[in-house]
Amino acid sequence: MTEHQPLARFVADLSYEALPSDVRDRVGLVVADTVGAIIGGSTTEPVRTLRTQYTAHETGEASVLGTPSSVSVAHAATLNGIAGTVLELDEGHKRAAGHPAIHVLPAVLAVAEADNGTTRDMLTAFVAGYETAARVARACQPLADGYHPHGVWGVVGAAAGVANYRGLTAESVAEALRMAANHAQHTRFEAALEGATVRDTYAGMVAPAAIRAVDQAQAGFSGVDDGIRLHLESVASGAVEPIPTATLGDEWEILEGYFKVHAACRYTHPSLDAIDDLSGETELDPETITSVSVETYPAAAGLAEPTPETRLAAKFSIPFAIASRLVHGHAGKAAFEPDAFRADVYELSSRVTVESTPAFAAATPDSRGARVTLNHGGETLSATVEHARGGATRPFDEPRLREKFDSLVSPVLGAAAVDTAWETARSRTATDVSALCEQLTPSAAE
Protein backbone atom coordinates (compact mmCIF):
# COMPACT_ATOMS: atom_id res chain seq x y z
CA MET A 1 0.00 0.00 0.00
CA THR A 2 3.05 2.22 -0.42
CA GLU A 3 1.46 5.00 -2.46
CA HIS A 4 -1.43 5.47 0.00
CA GLN A 5 0.35 4.45 3.20
CA PRO A 6 0.32 7.79 5.10
CA LEU A 7 -3.37 8.40 4.37
CA ALA A 8 -4.42 4.84 5.15
CA ARG A 9 -2.42 4.87 8.38
CA PHE A 10 -4.01 8.15 9.42
CA VAL A 11 -7.51 6.82 8.75
CA ALA A 12 -6.85 3.54 10.56
CA ASP A 13 -5.26 5.15 13.62
CA LEU A 14 -7.42 8.26 14.12
CA SER A 15 -9.19 8.32 17.49
CA TYR A 16 -11.47 10.83 19.19
CA GLU A 17 -8.76 11.51 21.77
CA ALA A 18 -6.43 12.58 18.96
CA LEU A 19 -8.77 15.34 17.80
CA PRO A 20 -7.72 18.80 19.03
CA SER A 21 -10.35 20.78 20.91
CA ASP A 22 -10.93 23.19 18.02
CA VAL A 23 -11.52 20.27 15.67
CA ARG A 24 -13.97 18.67 18.11
CA ASP A 25 -15.89 21.93 18.34
CA ARG A 26 -15.85 22.45 14.58
CA VAL A 27 -17.04 18.94 13.78
CA GLY A 28 -20.05 19.52 16.02
CA LEU A 29 -20.94 22.63 14.03
CA VAL A 30 -20.42 20.90 10.68
CA VAL A 31 -22.59 17.95 11.71
CA ALA A 32 -25.34 20.23 13.03
CA ASP A 33 -25.28 22.36 9.90
CA THR A 34 -25.35 19.30 7.64
CA VAL A 35 -28.18 17.73 9.64
CA GLY A 36 -30.14 20.97 9.28
CA ALA A 37 -29.72 20.90 5.50
CA ILE A 38 -30.82 17.25 5.41
CA ILE A 39 -33.94 17.83 7.50
CA GLY A 40 -34.81 20.98 5.55
CA GLY A 41 -34.55 19.08 2.28
CA SER A 42 -36.38 15.98 3.47
CA THR A 43 -39.83 17.40 2.65
CA THR A 44 -39.05 18.45 -0.92
CA GLU A 45 -40.09 16.61 -4.06
CA PRO A 46 -39.05 14.22 -5.46
CA VAL A 47 -37.09 13.33 -2.29
CA ARG A 48 -40.34 12.62 -0.45
CA THR A 49 -41.62 10.36 -3.24
CA LEU A 50 -38.37 8.38 -3.37
CA ARG A 51 -38.65 7.76 0.37
CA THR A 52 -42.21 6.57 -0.10
CA GLN A 53 -41.01 4.12 -2.74
CA TYR A 54 -38.41 2.68 -0.38
CA THR A 55 -40.65 2.49 2.67
CA ALA A 56 -43.37 0.72 0.70
CA HIS A 57 -41.12 -2.32 0.44
CA GLU A 58 -38.85 -2.29 3.48
CA THR A 59 -38.13 -1.21 7.00
CA GLY A 60 -34.65 -1.07 8.44
CA GLU A 61 -32.32 0.04 11.16
CA ALA A 62 -31.21 3.44 9.82
CA SER A 63 -33.16 6.71 10.12
CA VAL A 64 -34.25 8.99 7.33
CA LEU A 65 -33.69 12.30 9.11
CA GLY A 66 -36.65 14.64 9.34
CA THR A 67 -39.08 11.76 8.83
CA PRO A 68 -40.48 8.91 10.94
CA SER A 69 -39.05 6.35 8.51
CA SER A 70 -36.29 3.81 9.02
CA VAL A 71 -34.96 1.85 6.07
CA SER A 72 -31.84 -0.08 5.13
CA VAL A 73 -28.45 1.49 5.74
CA ALA A 74 -27.86 1.99 2.01
CA HIS A 75 -31.26 3.57 1.37
CA ALA A 76 -31.15 5.79 4.46
CA ALA A 77 -27.72 7.10 3.54
CA THR A 78 -28.85 7.69 -0.04
CA LEU A 79 -31.98 9.58 1.01
CA ASN A 80 -30.11 11.69 3.57
CA GLY A 81 -27.41 12.50 1.03
CA ILE A 82 -29.96 13.62 -1.54
CA ALA A 83 -32.00 15.62 0.97
CA GLY A 84 -28.87 17.38 2.20
CA THR A 85 -27.97 18.44 -1.33
CA VAL A 86 -31.28 19.57 -2.77
CA LEU A 87 -31.44 22.96 -1.01
CA GLU A 88 -27.84 23.97 -1.83
CA LEU A 89 -27.27 24.83 1.83
CA ASP A 90 -24.74 22.16 2.77
CA GLU A 91 -21.26 22.94 4.08
CA GLY A 92 -18.43 23.18 1.55
CA HIS A 93 -14.67 23.53 1.21
CA LYS A 94 -12.96 26.08 -1.04
CA ARG A 95 -9.72 24.20 -1.69
CA ALA A 96 -11.64 21.01 -2.40
CA ALA A 97 -13.97 23.00 -4.68
CA GLY A 98 -16.85 20.90 -3.40
CA HIS A 99 -18.72 19.56 -0.39
CA PRO A 100 -16.96 16.92 1.72
CA ALA A 101 -19.48 16.77 4.58
CA ILE A 102 -22.57 15.71 2.64
CA HIS A 103 -20.59 12.91 0.99
CA VAL A 104 -19.27 11.52 4.27
CA LEU A 105 -21.88 12.10 7.00
CA PRO A 106 -24.82 10.11 5.54
CA ALA A 107 -22.64 7.02 5.19
CA VAL A 108 -21.01 7.05 8.62
CA LEU A 109 -24.24 8.09 10.36
CA ALA A 110 -26.27 5.23 8.88
CA VAL A 111 -23.56 2.64 9.52
CA ALA A 112 -23.03 3.78 13.11
CA GLU A 113 -26.76 3.93 13.90
CA ALA A 114 -27.34 0.41 12.60
CA ASP A 115 -24.39 -0.75 14.69
CA ASN A 116 -25.68 0.97 17.86
CA GLY A 117 -22.42 2.90 17.87
CA THR A 118 -21.27 5.77 20.02
CA THR A 119 -21.40 9.38 18.96
CA ARG A 120 -17.67 9.74 19.58
CA ASP A 121 -16.86 6.89 17.21
CA MET A 122 -19.19 8.32 14.58
CA LEU A 123 -17.66 11.79 14.86
CA THR A 124 -14.15 10.37 14.62
CA ALA A 125 -15.13 8.46 11.51
CA PHE A 126 -16.65 11.62 10.06
CA VAL A 127 -13.42 13.55 10.57
CA ALA A 128 -11.38 10.73 9.02
CA GLY A 129 -13.67 10.80 6.01
CA TYR A 130 -13.74 14.58 5.73
CA GLU A 131 -9.95 14.90 5.89
CA THR A 132 -9.62 12.20 3.23
CA ALA A 133 -12.26 13.65 0.93
CA ALA A 134 -10.83 17.17 1.05
CA ARG A 135 -7.28 16.01 0.38
CA VAL A 136 -8.24 13.70 -2.48
CA ALA A 137 -10.29 16.55 -3.95
CA ARG A 138 -7.29 18.87 -3.78
CA ALA A 139 -5.20 16.31 -5.64
CA CYS A 140 -7.79 16.22 -8.45
CA GLN A 141 -8.15 19.98 -8.91
CA PRO A 142 -9.11 21.35 -11.26
CA LEU A 143 -11.61 18.84 -12.57
CA ALA A 144 -11.94 18.23 -16.29
CA ASP A 145 -14.30 20.51 -18.18
CA GLY A 146 -17.94 19.68 -17.62
CA TYR A 147 -17.56 17.68 -14.40
CA HIS A 148 -19.62 18.50 -11.35
CA PRO A 149 -17.69 17.86 -8.09
CA HIS A 150 -20.55 15.99 -6.39
CA GLY A 151 -20.15 12.23 -6.63
CA VAL A 152 -16.55 12.24 -7.83
CA TRP A 153 -13.89 12.19 -5.08
CA GLY A 154 -16.39 12.08 -2.20
CA VAL A 155 -16.72 8.30 -2.44
CA VAL A 156 -13.11 7.92 -1.28
CA GLY A 157 -13.81 10.09 1.76
CA ALA A 158 -16.99 8.21 2.63
CA ALA A 159 -15.11 4.91 2.41
CA ALA A 160 -12.41 6.29 4.72
CA GLY A 161 -15.04 7.27 7.27
CA VAL A 162 -16.72 3.86 7.22
CA ALA A 163 -13.34 2.11 7.36
CA ASN A 164 -12.29 4.12 10.41
CA TYR A 165 -15.59 3.36 12.15
CA ARG A 166 -15.22 -0.35 11.51
CA GLY A 167 -11.63 -0.39 12.73
CA LEU A 168 -9.95 -1.66 9.57
CA THR A 169 -6.19 -2.11 9.54
CA ALA A 170 -4.15 0.34 7.52
CA GLU A 171 -3.63 -2.29 4.84
CA SER A 172 -7.37 -2.89 4.52
CA VAL A 173 -8.08 0.85 4.56
CA ALA A 174 -5.71 1.30 1.62
CA GLU A 175 -7.55 -1.40 -0.33
CA ALA A 176 -10.92 0.16 0.48
CA LEU A 177 -9.80 3.58 -0.73
CA ARG A 178 -8.36 2.14 -3.94
CA MET A 179 -11.59 0.32 -4.68
CA ALA A 180 -13.81 3.21 -3.66
CA ALA A 181 -12.15 5.45 -6.26
CA ASN A 182 -13.36 2.99 -8.89
CA HIS A 183 -16.91 4.14 -8.07
CA ALA A 184 -16.38 7.81 -8.89
CA GLN A 185 -19.33 9.01 -10.96
CA HIS A 186 -19.07 10.70 -14.32
CA THR A 187 -21.18 13.64 -13.22
CA ARG A 188 -22.05 16.57 -15.45
CA PHE A 189 -22.28 20.24 -14.52
CA GLU A 190 -24.84 20.70 -17.28
CA ALA A 191 -27.36 18.91 -15.09
CA ALA A 192 -27.31 21.80 -12.63
CA LEU A 193 -27.50 24.45 -15.33
CA GLU A 194 -30.39 22.70 -17.07
CA GLY A 195 -32.19 21.92 -13.82
CA ALA A 196 -31.90 18.16 -14.31
CA THR A 197 -32.30 16.88 -10.77
CA VAL A 198 -30.14 13.84 -11.36
CA ARG A 199 -27.54 16.27 -10.05
CA ASP A 200 -29.22 16.19 -6.63
CA THR A 201 -28.64 12.43 -6.48
CA TYR A 202 -24.87 12.54 -7.01
CA ALA A 203 -23.84 12.89 -3.37
CA GLY A 204 -26.48 10.46 -2.15
CA MET A 205 -25.26 7.73 -4.50
CA VAL A 206 -21.80 7.87 -2.91
CA ALA A 207 -22.71 6.08 0.33
CA PRO A 208 -23.76 2.64 -0.97
CA ALA A 209 -20.64 2.44 -3.15
CA ALA A 210 -18.38 3.49 -0.28
CA ILE A 211 -19.92 0.98 2.15
CA ARG A 212 -19.58 -1.83 -0.38
CA ALA A 213 -15.93 -0.96 -1.01
CA VAL A 214 -15.26 -1.29 2.71
CA ASP A 215 -17.23 -4.56 2.82
CA GLN A 216 -15.10 -5.89 0.00
CA ALA A 217 -11.83 -4.80 1.59
CA GLN A 218 -12.83 -6.53 4.82
CA ALA A 219 -13.60 -9.68 2.86
CA GLY A 220 -10.16 -9.66 1.26
CA PHE A 221 -10.75 -8.09 -2.14
CA SER A 222 -7.95 -5.88 -3.39
CA GLY A 223 -7.73 -2.70 -5.41
CA VAL A 224 -5.54 -1.61 -8.28
CA ASP A 225 -2.08 -0.38 -7.29
CA ASP A 226 -2.17 3.42 -7.10
CA GLY A 227 -5.90 3.04 -7.59
CA ILE A 228 -6.94 6.49 -6.37
CA ARG A 229 -4.84 8.19 -9.01
CA LEU A 230 -5.67 5.73 -11.80
CA HIS A 231 -9.41 5.77 -11.24
CA LEU A 232 -9.64 9.53 -10.81
CA GLU A 233 -7.27 10.71 -13.52
CA SER A 234 -10.06 10.78 -16.10
CA VAL A 235 -12.00 13.35 -14.04
CA ALA A 236 -9.06 15.72 -13.60
CA SER A 237 -8.09 18.30 -16.19
CA GLY A 238 -4.44 17.34 -15.75
CA ALA A 239 -2.48 14.82 -13.76
CA VAL A 240 -3.84 13.77 -10.37
CA GLU A 241 -1.30 15.20 -7.94
CA PRO A 242 0.04 13.29 -4.94
CA ILE A 243 -2.48 13.46 -2.12
CA PRO A 244 -1.24 16.09 0.37
CA THR A 245 -0.55 13.98 3.44
CA ALA A 246 2.47 15.70 5.02
CA THR A 247 0.30 17.73 7.40
CA LEU A 248 -2.13 14.96 8.40
CA GLY A 249 -2.85 15.28 12.10
CA ASP A 250 -1.26 18.74 12.27
CA GLU A 251 -3.40 20.78 9.89
CA TRP A 252 -7.10 19.98 9.65
CA GLU A 253 -9.09 20.55 6.47
CA ILE A 254 -12.35 20.59 8.41
CA LEU A 255 -11.32 23.91 9.97
CA GLU A 256 -11.11 25.46 6.48
CA GLY A 257 -14.64 24.71 5.28
CA TYR A 258 -17.42 27.20 4.72
CA PHE A 259 -21.07 27.44 5.74
CA LYS A 260 -23.86 28.75 3.52
CA VAL A 261 -26.93 30.86 4.24
CA HIS A 262 -27.79 31.62 0.61
CA ALA A 263 -29.64 28.57 -0.79
CA ALA A 264 -27.78 28.65 -4.08
CA CYS A 265 -24.54 27.55 -5.70
CA ARG A 266 -21.49 28.96 -3.91
CA TYR A 267 -20.52 30.74 -7.13
CA THR A 268 -23.50 33.07 -6.61
CA HIS A 269 -22.58 34.00 -3.04
CA PRO A 270 -20.15 36.89 -3.64
CA SER A 271 -22.80 38.61 -5.74
CA LEU A 272 -25.52 37.94 -3.17
CA ASP A 273 -23.27 39.18 -0.37
CA ALA A 274 -22.71 42.36 -2.37
CA ILE A 275 -26.48 42.85 -2.60
CA ASP A 276 -26.71 42.31 1.17
CA ASP A 277 -24.02 44.96 1.68
CA LEU A 278 -25.82 47.45 -0.55
CA SER A 279 -29.13 46.72 1.18
CA GLY A 280 -27.48 47.49 4.50
CA GLU A 281 -26.52 50.94 3.24
CA THR A 282 -29.59 51.83 1.15
CA GLU A 283 -33.19 50.68 1.19
CA LEU A 284 -33.32 49.07 -2.23
CA ASP A 285 -36.59 49.21 -4.17
CA PRO A 286 -36.59 46.54 -6.91
CA GLU A 287 -39.04 48.57 -8.99
CA THR A 288 -36.55 51.42 -9.34
CA ILE A 289 -33.58 49.24 -10.33
CA THR A 290 -33.06 49.63 -14.07
CA SER A 291 -29.89 47.56 -14.43
CA VAL A 292 -27.57 45.28 -12.46
CA SER A 293 -24.10 44.36 -13.71
CA VAL A 294 -21.99 41.66 -12.14
CA GLU A 295 -18.25 41.28 -12.63
CA THR A 296 -16.85 38.03 -11.33
CA TYR A 297 -14.54 35.07 -12.02
CA PRO A 298 -14.95 32.71 -15.00
CA ALA A 299 -16.71 29.76 -13.31
CA ALA A 300 -19.29 32.07 -11.75
CA ALA A 301 -19.78 34.02 -14.97
CA GLY A 302 -21.11 30.84 -16.55
CA LEU A 303 -24.18 31.02 -14.30
CA ALA A 304 -25.89 33.67 -16.41
CA GLU A 305 -29.25 32.19 -17.48
CA PRO A 306 -31.87 34.85 -16.62
CA THR A 307 -35.02 32.71 -16.85
CA PRO A 308 -34.47 29.37 -15.11
CA GLU A 309 -37.62 27.26 -14.81
CA THR A 310 -36.80 24.88 -11.97
CA ARG A 311 -35.59 25.10 -8.38
CA LEU A 312 -32.22 23.62 -9.25
CA ALA A 313 -31.58 25.75 -12.31
CA ALA A 314 -32.54 28.88 -10.33
CA LYS A 315 -29.90 28.06 -7.73
CA PHE A 316 -27.31 28.08 -10.52
CA SER A 317 -28.40 31.42 -11.99
CA ILE A 318 -26.78 34.63 -10.75
CA PRO A 319 -29.44 36.84 -12.41
CA PHE A 320 -32.31 34.93 -10.82
CA ALA A 321 -30.60 34.67 -7.44
CA ILE A 322 -30.00 38.42 -7.34
CA ALA A 323 -33.52 39.24 -8.52
CA SER A 324 -35.14 36.87 -6.04
CA ARG A 325 -32.98 38.26 -3.24
CA LEU A 326 -34.03 41.80 -4.10
CA VAL A 327 -37.73 41.00 -4.45
CA HIS A 328 -38.09 38.68 -1.46
CA GLY A 329 -35.53 40.29 0.84
CA HIS A 330 -33.43 37.15 1.29
CA ALA A 331 -31.80 34.30 -0.65
CA GLY A 332 -32.82 31.46 1.67
CA LYS A 333 -34.77 28.31 0.93
CA ALA A 334 -38.05 30.06 0.05
CA ALA A 335 -36.35 32.34 -2.50
CA PHE A 336 -35.89 29.36 -4.81
CA GLU A 337 -39.11 27.46 -4.21
CA PRO A 338 -41.90 27.45 -6.86
CA ASP A 339 -43.76 30.36 -5.24
CA ALA A 340 -40.69 32.55 -5.89
CA PHE A 341 -40.96 32.11 -9.66
CA ARG A 342 -42.92 35.29 -10.20
CA ALA A 343 -43.19 37.68 -13.10
CA ASP A 344 -41.56 40.54 -11.19
CA VAL A 345 -38.57 38.34 -10.31
CA TYR A 346 -38.10 37.29 -13.92
CA GLU A 347 -38.50 40.87 -15.12
CA LEU A 348 -35.75 42.05 -12.79
CA SER A 349 -33.60 39.04 -13.61
CA SER A 350 -33.68 40.06 -17.28
CA ARG A 351 -31.94 43.31 -16.29
CA VAL A 352 -28.93 41.53 -14.74
CA THR A 353 -25.78 41.02 -16.80
CA VAL A 354 -22.85 38.83 -15.76
CA GLU A 355 -19.31 38.84 -17.09
CA SER A 356 -15.89 37.53 -16.16
CA THR A 357 -13.22 40.18 -15.74
CA PRO A 358 -9.41 39.75 -15.69
CA ALA A 359 -8.99 41.03 -12.15
CA PHE A 360 -11.41 38.53 -10.62
CA ALA A 361 -10.12 35.72 -12.84
CA ALA A 362 -6.53 36.37 -11.77
CA ALA A 363 -7.46 36.31 -8.08
CA THR A 364 -8.71 32.69 -8.15
CA PRO A 365 -8.51 30.29 -6.46
CA ASP A 366 -7.53 32.20 -3.30
CA SER A 367 -10.23 34.80 -3.85
CA ARG A 368 -13.51 34.08 -5.60
CA GLY A 369 -15.17 37.44 -5.64
CA ALA A 370 -17.59 39.72 -7.44
CA ARG A 371 -18.47 43.34 -7.95
CA VAL A 372 -22.13 44.29 -8.30
CA THR A 373 -23.13 47.64 -9.74
CA LEU A 374 -26.75 48.68 -10.01
CA ASN A 375 -28.67 51.68 -11.18
CA HIS A 376 -31.16 52.49 -8.44
CA GLY A 377 -33.48 55.33 -9.28
CA GLY A 378 -30.82 57.01 -11.38
CA GLU A 379 -28.13 56.57 -8.71
CA THR A 380 -25.21 54.20 -9.29
CA LEU A 381 -24.48 51.90 -6.35
CA SER A 382 -21.62 49.41 -6.23
CA ALA A 383 -20.20 46.86 -3.81
CA THR A 384 -17.22 44.51 -4.11
CA VAL A 385 -16.83 41.22 -2.27
CA GLU A 386 -13.49 39.43 -2.42
CA HIS A 387 -14.48 36.50 -0.21
CA ALA A 388 -18.03 35.25 0.29
CA ARG A 389 -19.23 35.07 3.88
CA GLY A 390 -19.17 31.80 5.78
CA GLY A 391 -15.60 30.73 5.11
CA ALA A 392 -12.43 31.01 7.17
CA THR A 393 -11.83 34.59 6.00
CA ARG A 394 -15.33 35.85 6.88
CA PRO A 395 -16.85 33.25 9.23
CA PHE A 396 -20.37 33.21 10.60
CA ASP A 397 -20.76 33.18 14.35
CA GLU A 398 -22.62 30.30 15.97
CA PRO A 399 -25.87 32.26 16.55
CA ARG A 400 -26.12 32.85 12.80
CA LEU A 401 -25.72 29.13 12.12
CA ARG A 402 -28.27 28.34 14.81
CA GLU A 403 -30.70 30.76 13.15
CA LYS A 404 -30.23 28.93 9.85
CA PHE A 405 -30.75 25.56 11.59
CA ASP A 406 -33.97 26.75 13.21
CA SER A 407 -35.34 28.02 9.90
CA LEU A 408 -34.80 24.62 8.27
CA VAL A 409 -35.69 22.29 11.12
CA SER A 410 -38.61 24.01 12.84
CA PRO A 411 -41.06 23.62 9.91
CA VAL A 412 -40.29 19.89 9.82
CA LEU A 413 -39.87 18.83 13.46
CA GLY A 414 -41.84 21.62 15.12
CA ALA A 415 -40.67 24.59 17.15
CA ALA A 416 -40.75 22.63 20.41
CA ALA A 417 -38.14 20.17 19.15
CA VAL A 418 -35.59 22.61 17.74
CA ASP A 419 -33.59 23.31 20.91
CA THR A 420 -33.07 19.63 21.63
CA ALA A 421 -32.34 18.88 17.98
CA TRP A 422 -29.64 21.56 17.87
CA GLU A 423 -27.97 20.48 21.10
CA THR A 424 -28.05 16.85 19.98
CA ALA A 425 -26.79 17.50 16.46
CA ARG A 426 -24.16 19.86 17.87
CA SER A 427 -22.86 16.74 19.68
CA ARG A 428 -23.34 18.13 23.15
CA THR A 429 -25.77 15.60 24.58
CA ALA A 430 -26.33 12.20 22.95
CA THR A 431 -23.71 9.57 23.72
CA ASP A 432 -24.94 7.08 21.12
CA VAL A 433 -25.99 7.54 17.53
CA SER A 434 -29.42 5.97 17.98
CA ALA A 435 -30.31 8.62 20.57
CA LEU A 436 -28.94 11.32 18.28
CA CYS A 437 -31.08 10.19 15.35
CA GLU A 438 -34.14 9.82 17.57
CA GLN A 439 -34.02 13.56 18.29
CA LEU A 440 -33.87 14.33 14.58
CA THR A 441 -37.16 12.69 13.60
CA PRO A 442 -40.74 13.98 13.97
CA SER A 443 -41.53 11.42 16.65
CA ALA A 444 -39.15 13.25 18.99
CA ALA A 445 -41.51 16.24 19.02
CA GLU A 446 -44.61 14.21 19.87
Image (cartoon, helix red, strand yellow):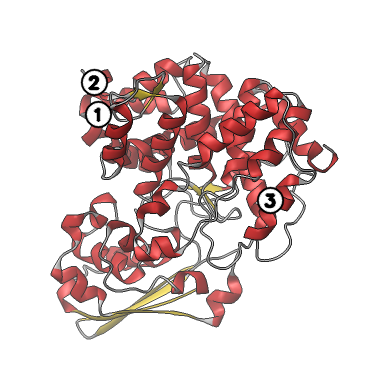
Label 2: how many residues lie within 10 Å, few (<14), some (14-19) or many (20+)? some
On the rendered image, what quadrant is the C terminus found in?
A: top left
The correct choice, above or below, for 348 with respect to 16 in the image is below
Describe residue 130's horizontal placement relative to residue 377 as left or right: right
Q: Name, please, the residue furthest toward the right.
A: 2
Disc 3 residue type?
A: His
**CB under 8 Å between discs 1 and 3:** no
**CB under 8 Å between discs 2 and 1:** yes
- Give the residue at x 28% y 45%: 46
Which residue occupies the foreground of this view, 276 or 242? 242
Occupied quadrant, residue 52? top left
Q: CA distance from mark 2 to mark 1?
A: 6 Å
Name the secondary structure under disc 2: helix
Q: Which mark is residue 312?
A: none
Residue occupied by mark 2? 445
| Residue 195 in sight in this render | yes
Q: CA distance from mark 1 to mark 3?
A: 41 Å
Q: Nearer the viewer, mark 1 or mark 3?
A: 3
Q: Position of residue 2 (x, y in %)?
A: 85, 39
Residue occupied by mark 3? 231
Q: Position of residue 433 (x, y in %)?
A: 46, 19
The correct choice, above or below, for 5 with respect to 303 in the image is above
Which residue occupies the foreground of this view, 252 or 211? 211
Residue occupied by mark 1? 413
Q: Position of residue 395 (x, y in %)?
A: 48, 49
Label 1: how many residues lie within 10 Å, few (<14), some (14-19) or many (20+)? many
Describe residue 352's horizontal placement relative to residue 391 as left or right: left
